Image (spheres, grey):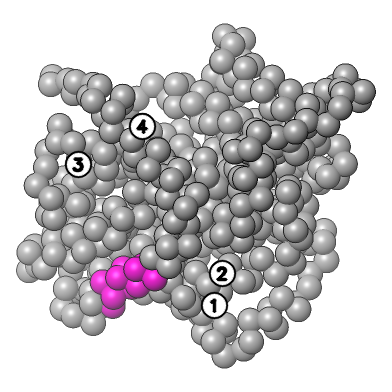
């Protein structure tokens, strides 16, 4: 067996430089970055090209026998629809937390969900579903037609010659794994806060802002995750014998309970403590434009789910034509966009469900999404952020993966509770901003690859 050597130059030189560049881009060129989001129309153009040309006739199967084993069409479309509704529900929950339940160092915006969705679908070319559909098709072509493991480096190799040890290939694959970690961690963070909101008001019972109680609460939590006792409990919760349908909500419920207890304890211990004056850097971050920070965060949140969502779509779409997969994935986003174009989107803001019904729908979305994308059967795929050929997975020890996920969740919690959406946006943007360029390169590579392998 050939082992891949650790690249210390990437760990200690390239990675820190890329993160530093991300911090500078976030602080000084964020508006330029947001303007670049119009480039996501490239993926939409690639999707349209595959739909209207004969390339869309290709099936995600090696032969007619494989194509005949595909899921029934109604079952396949139901899987896609449930995924999309769950994603929209979770995204709605995150916007509700940021705009109403627990906005930290920011203002309340009751129209945040509708306005954000309107911008992403109409101004950015059906983002992110244009990207999800296209990359899922690319994975399917590699796995089902060419019998090759669908790593992200494989998807981009037609533009940049590479191998598993090539710097570009390693950056792409490591970046994809990092996206998965951030997707899970950020969603677990907001799931925890949403769980708390069902019982108590987070505004009243959680320590937030740059004050001693909030700093102590989050730092104590972060330190606890590195103890052997905490790691043992994490291993038990995310054991292979426990379904993620149970382990994810149990973890969020336990984290929420600990967070509430620590908040009350630290609040009592620091009642007489004078207010803390934030350092200049923290002050600037707190006063950073919250709309800009939210736009960057929400865009990166969707992109972070790319490996998981595309792998799911590719898995259920075996045997289907490329055109069918693209249209099936984009059907609901197109329908929503048509409503946005036909009716003033402020009308949707006026539609009001009861708070209880809204929270229940969002809670169901939270409970469905992560177990649907990450379960004990495909955890190894999530760890490596790829889609395996012939369904043969490369099994990995899952415990370190879940331990890192928990530690990153607590780190994100620290940035959110202390600084707000500005802090968590910077924390996610700095290490992952290159992924926006990579998904566009991947879109073009898939078109070229589909053309070269056409029948």
Location of residue 185 by image quarter: top right
Lower sequence index among marks 3 and 2: 2
Task: Tell me, for residue 336, which label it has, or none.
Answer: 1
Magenta residues span 37-48
Residue 21 vs residue 384, the one in the foreground: 21
Residue 175 belongs to magenta span: no
- Image quarter (top left, top right, bottom left or bottom right) of the C terminus: bottom left
Tell me the residue that label 4 is attached to.
16
Q: CA distance from mark 1 to mark 2?
A: 9 Å
Residue 41 vs residue 79, the one in the foreground: 41
Q: Nearer the viewer, mark 4 or mark 1?
A: 4
Q: Kindly check if marks 1 and 3 are in contact, taking CB atoms under 8 A apart as contact.
A: no
Location of residue 193 by image quarter: top right
Q: CA distance from mark 4 to mark 1?
A: 40 Å
Q: Kindly check if marks 2 and 4 are in contact, taking CB atoms under 8 A apart as contact.
A: no
Tell me the residue that label 3 is attached to.
168
Q: Residue at point 72% right, 27% down? A: 215
Q: Residue at point 63% right, 81% down? A: 345
Tell me the residue that label 2 is attached to.
117
Lower sequence index among marks 1 and 2: 2
């Amino acid at each position: 067996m050939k082992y891949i050597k650790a690249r210390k130059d990437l760990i200690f030189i390239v990675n820190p430089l890329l993160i530093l560049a991300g911090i500078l881009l976030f602080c000084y060129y964020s508006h330029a970055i947001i303007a670049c989001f119009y480039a996501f129309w490239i993926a939409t153009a690639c999707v349209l090209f595959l739909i209207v040309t004969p390339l869309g006739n290709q099936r995600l199967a090696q032969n007619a026998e494989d194509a005949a084993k595909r899921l029934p069409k109604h079952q396949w479309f139901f899987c896609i629809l449930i995924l999309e509704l769950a994603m929209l529900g979770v995204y709605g929950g995150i916007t509700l937390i940021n705009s109403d339940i627990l906005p930290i160092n920011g203002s309340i915006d009751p129209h945040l969900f509708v306005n954000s969705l309107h911008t992403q679908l109409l101004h950015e070319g059906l983002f992110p579903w244009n990207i999800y559909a296209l990359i899922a098709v690319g994975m399917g072509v590699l796995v089902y037609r060419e019998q090759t493991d669908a790593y992200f480096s494989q998807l981009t190799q037609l533009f940049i010659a590479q191998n598993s040890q090539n710097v570009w290939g390693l950056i792409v694959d490591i970046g994809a794994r990092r996206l998965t970690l951030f997707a899970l961690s950020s969603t677990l963070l907001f799931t925890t806060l949403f769980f708390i909101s069902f019982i108590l008001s987070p505004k009243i019972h959680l320590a937030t802002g740059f004050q001693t109680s909030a700093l102590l609460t989050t730092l104590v939590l972060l330190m606890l995750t590195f103890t052997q006792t905490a790691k043992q409990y994490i291993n038990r919760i995310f054991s292979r014998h426990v379904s993620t349908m149970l382990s994810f909500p149990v973890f969020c419920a336990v984290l929420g309970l600990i967070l509430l207890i620590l908040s009350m304890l630290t609040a009592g211990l620091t009642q007489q403590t004078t207010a803390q004056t934030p350092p200049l850097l923290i002050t600037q971050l707190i006063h950073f434009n919250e709309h800009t920070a939210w736009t960057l965060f929400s865009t990166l949140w969707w992109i972070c789910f790319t490996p998981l969502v595309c792998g799911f779509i590719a898995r259920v779409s075996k045997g289907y034509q490329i055109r069918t997969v693209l249209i099936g994935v984009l059907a609901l986003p197109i329908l929503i966009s048509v409503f946005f174009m036909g009716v003033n989107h402020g009308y949707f803001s006026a539609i009001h469900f009861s708070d209880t019904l809204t929270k229940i729908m969002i809670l169901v979305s939270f409970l469905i999404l992560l177990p649907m994308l990450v379960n004990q059967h495909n955890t190894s795929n999530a760890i490596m952020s790829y889609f395996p050929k012939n369904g043969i997975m490369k099994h990995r020890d899952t415990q370190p993966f879940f331990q890192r996920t928990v530690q990153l969740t607590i780190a994100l919690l620290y940035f959110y509770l202390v600084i707000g959406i500005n802090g968590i946006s910077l924390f996610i943007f700095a290490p992952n901003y290159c992924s926006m360029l990579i998904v566009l390169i991947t879109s073009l590579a898939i078109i070229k690859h589909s053309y070269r392998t056409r029948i």
